[in-house]
Image (spheres, grey):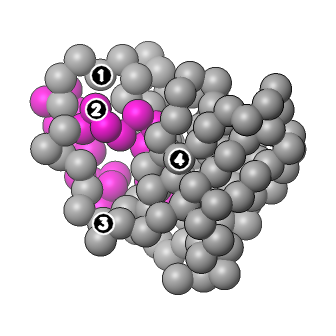
Amino acid sequence: MSNILRQHNLITHSPDETIVLGAKLAKELKPGSIICLFGDLGAGKTTLVKGFAKGLRLKADDVHSPTFTLLNIYEGKGRRTLYHFDLYRLAESSEIELLGYEEFLYGQGLSVIEWPERLGQLMPKEYIRIELSHRAEFERGISIKEVK
């Protein structure tokens, strides 16, 4: 596990710091990594995904929550493709199966899942668990753990 992934509890003090953290993490993750983001609405999950995009040399400004489509795919001149799932509106895990989600999760890109608890039995066996929590208006507590 890389240096930044070994830091289990971090604090960011602004959205920009959260983006910088995401960029650093993305640079240290292997192709095929799966990141599961846990946290309340507005906790900074999508902001962290913007950082992942930046770290993969993709356009962070293009990143937005795929709440109504379940999945956004970001690719370009970056290091690899970013698969951004937002399962907030997922009613049943069978809906994600229709997308062929395994092709994305277990490919060579970086897969980031917001609201992964909605996967139920389809939850990956190995992933990086990142929990984000509100501490103050712009301050976020971020906990990182590798799940195997």
* Amino acid of disc 2: Arg
Q: Pick whichever of labels 2 and 3 is earlier in the sequence.
A: 2
Residue 38 place in picture, x, y as percent: 47, 40
How far apart marks 2 and 4 lie (CA) works out to 15 Å
Against 95, is 32 above or below? below
Q: Pick whichever of labels 1 and 3 is earlier in the sequence.
A: 1
Q: Closer to us: mark 2 or mark 4?
A: 4
| Residue extent of the magenta highlight | 94-119
Q: Pick whichever of labels 3 and 4 is earlier in the sequence.
A: 3
* Amino acid of disc 3: Glu
Task: Kindly state the secondary structure of the residue where label 4 is placed.
Answer: strand
From the image, tell me which residue sits under label 2: 118
Q: Is residue 69 magenta?
A: no
From the image, tell me which residue sits under label 1: 90
Residues tagged 2 and 4 counted as in contact (Cβ below 8 A) = no
From the image, tell me which residue sits under label 3: 126
Residues tagged 2 and 1 counted as in contact (Cβ below 8 A) = yes
From the image, tell me which residue sits under label 4: 131
Q: Pick whichever of labels 2 and 4 is earlier in the sequence.
A: 2
Instruction: From the viewer's perspective, tell me whether residue 115 is left or right of residue 27.
Output: left
Q: Pick whichever of labels 2 and 1 is earlier in the sequence.
A: 1
